[in-house]
Amino acid sequence: MSMTEKTFVLGEKIKWENVGEGVQRRILGYDDQLMMIAVQFQKGSIGYVHKHPHRQVTYIESGSFEVKIGKDTQTLRKGDCYFIPPNIEHGVVALEESSLVDVFTPCREDILAAKKSKAK
C-alpha cells in the first residue's frame, strides 16, 4: 500500500465486511499504533461482550445503543461516545439501525488477521 493510499482513505473504495448477524464493518485507516473502523448495526444486532488489551474510544455516528462497560450499562445516542480501558469487558446492542466509529490503540492485529483469512 502506498503512502497516498494510507493517508487518504476514500470510504467509497472500502468494501463493507459482514462480521455477524446484522453487523458489518470497514477498516478506515491504520498503522501499527492506531486503527479506525466504521461499524453498522441493524436494529437488535449485538456487539457481543468481549475484552482486548487495546484502548478504545467509540463515537456513536447515528442511532442509539445500549452500551455495557464492565458492570455499567447506559443508553448512548448519536453524538455520544465512550472510552474503554484495556482488558475491560464491553459490548453493545443496537436499539435501532445505528452506526459507530471505533478507534483502537495499538492497532487490532486480530481484526487484520481475520480479514486476511476471509480473503483467502
Image (cartoon, rainbow, N blue to C red):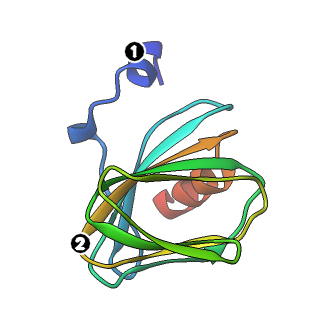
Q: State how far apart marks 2 and 1 are (Cα).
A: 33 Å
Residue 51, image x, y percentages: 71, 67
- Nearer to us of marks 2 and 1 is 2
Q: Which of the two residues, 47 or 24, is positioned nearer the viewer here?
A: 47
Q: Amino acid at mark 2?
A: Glu
Q: Give the SS element for disc 1.
A: helix
Q: Which residue is mark 2?
A: 97
Which residue is pictured at 20% across the width and 40% down the height? 12
In the image, 57: left or right of 108? left
Q: Which residue is mark 1?
A: 4
Count up the numbered dots. Answer: 2
Q: Give the SS element for disc 2.
A: loop
User: Where 2 sits versus 74, above or below?
Assistant: above
In the image, 6: left or right of 15? right
To which quarter of the image does residue 39 belong? Answer: bottom left
Residue 52, image x, y percentages: 73, 60
User: Where 106 sits versus 45, above or below?
Assistant: above
Which residue is pictured at 70% across the width and 39% down the height? 106
Mark positioned earlier in the residue sequence (2 or 1) = 1
User: Where 45 sits versus 107, above or below?
Assistant: below
Which residue is pictured at 61% across the width and 34% down the height? 34
Q: Which of the two residues, 97 or 81, is positioned nearer the viewer here?
A: 81
